[in-house]
Image (cartoon, rainbow, N blue to C red):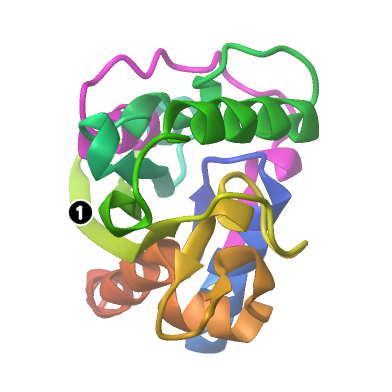
Amino acid sequence: MNILFATSNPHKVEEVVAILAPEGIKVRSLADVGDLPPEPVEDADTFAGNARIKARAYAKATGERCLADDSGLEVDALNGEPGVHSARYAGAQGDRAARDAANNAKLLEAIARVPDADRAARFVCAMCLADPDGTIVAETRGTFEGLITTDYRGTNGFGYDPLLFIPDQQCTSAELSPEMKNARSHRGQAVRLLVSSIASLDQ
């Protein structure tokens, strides 16, 4: 089976391919599409809503079965922020690394006076698979629980990975190996939940 993953983020592509390839599912990303359709406006107030918008838009535009995700960080002490605004939390311009750095700096500032015991947070990933006619054929959600640290740790991953501490591993998400991260992460959970639904679609 072939699926178009509606992202240009190479890190996300690597995570999804690592799980789906062994299942015989070939994944292409937007980087493999010649003429990209206009990027849809993701204006829903939930991760699931934004994933639906993106999956339907790219499936209809490309005529391919399309997988889309919307993911981000929820911090309890900040009433769930940055939430669906995670990628643009600081409003910074520039490349992905510059935006990530600005977002992380803003988060550390926002939570600076919050005691360690009250720093519970989680990564959330909502995934949606849509057919070219806009029909949604599968939706899943995964979470990855942890605590926000007081400084950056680790170089693996991207986004807020250096700031989410995983208590039972005594390290941040950015200090996990790619294999361990795929086994534990919000995106890994969401993709694995999709596997059985995907496998039955063309049978």
When asked about the image quadrant of residue 177, the answer is bottom right
- Which residue corresponds to mark 1? 137
Q: Position of residue 145 (x, y in %)?
A: 32, 65
Q: Secondary structure at mark 1?
A: strand
The residue depicted at 56 percent of the width and 25 percent of the height is 106
Q: Is residue 10 above or below residue 181?
A: above
Front residue of 89 and 21 = 89
Inspect the image, locate mark 1, and give the three-letter code of the amino acid beneath it. Answer: Val
Q: Position of residue 54 (x, y in %)?
A: 39, 30
Whether residue 19 is visible: no
When asked about the image quadrant of residue 85, the answer is top left
Front residue of 136 and 156 = 156
Magenta highlight on residue 36 = yes
Front residue of 79 and 184 = 79
The residue depicted at 44 percent of the width and 27 percent of the height is 110
Magenta highlight on residue 186 = no
The residue depicted at 40 percent of the width and 45 percent of the height is 69
Front residue of 42 and 109 = 109
Whether residue 185 is visible: yes
Q: Position of residue 159 (x, y in %)?
A: 61, 44
Could you tell me which quadrant the C terminus lies in? Answer: bottom left
Which region is colored magenta?
27-55
